[in-house]
Amino acid sequence: MRSKPSQSVVTAAMPSVLIVIGVAIVAIAIVNHFTAERTSAWPSTEARVIHAEVLSDTARRGGASYEPRVRYEYVVNGERHVGTRFSMATPTSRSRETIESMLGEYPEGSTVLAHYNPDDPSESVLDNTPRTAGAVMWAPGFVFIVVGGALHIANNRRRTREQATPERDAQ
């Protein structure tokens, strides 16, 4: 008789949950990567930076996180657009200085290049460089998958031992 059946359900389900979370994280990273890749072929036009600031999110566990917030205007085919996207995958950092350094290339009032979607010129980014930031998402995804797989193997071995033990005791 088992003392805690609910614990065994959690123990049995945990590897699958970790694997599903890992696969979801990796899938999001893949989509972000290909979306960022797509912008590298977008045409560019001159834009004027209207606003640039470092946005702080102190609600996150582990301390503050920072990201760039920008607003810029540009003209495509005689039509004026206002963009707010820094890049397809908005960079975040625990270091305010890192984000300030990024924004240093985009001071308010300056003329910069905005990269726009030729099929929808209202969609634009200032930085169209595919970044290795996607690797920041891939790594935890793979860790979840590996840990989930290892726990799954450990659970199967434990169950095999538990099933074999009563047979030996009966002999």
Image: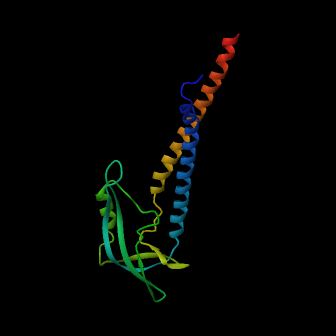
Location of residue 67 (image quadrant): bottom left
- Residue 83's place in the image compared with 57, above or below, is below
Q: Is residue 81 visible?
A: yes
- Of 163 and 91, the residue lying toward us: 163
Q: Position of residue 147 (x, y in %)?
A: 53, 38
Screen quadrant of the N terminus: top right
Most extreme residue toward the bottom is 78
Q: Position of residue 108 (x, y in %)?
A: 29, 75
Screen quadrant of the C terminus: top right
Location of residue 101 (image quadrant): bottom left
Q: Position of residue 12 (x, y in %)?
A: 58, 35
> In this figure, which colouring scheme has been used for the structure?
rainbow
- Of 152 and 111, the residue lying toward us: 152
- Of 10 and 134, the residue lying toward us: 10
All told, the count of numbered labels is 0
- Residue 81's place in the image compared with 24, above or below, is below
Tell me what residue is drawn at x 29 percent, y 78 percent. Answer: 109
Most extreme residue toward the right is 171
Q: Position of residue 48 (x, y in %)?
A: 35, 80
Q: Is residue 150 visible?
A: no
- Of 128 and 124, the residue lying toward us: 124
Please give left or right for residue 113 compared with residue 104 in the image: right
- Residue 146's place in the image compared with 97, above or below, is above
Tell me what residue is drawn at x 51 percent, y 74 percent. Answer: 42
Location of residue 3 (image quadrant): top right
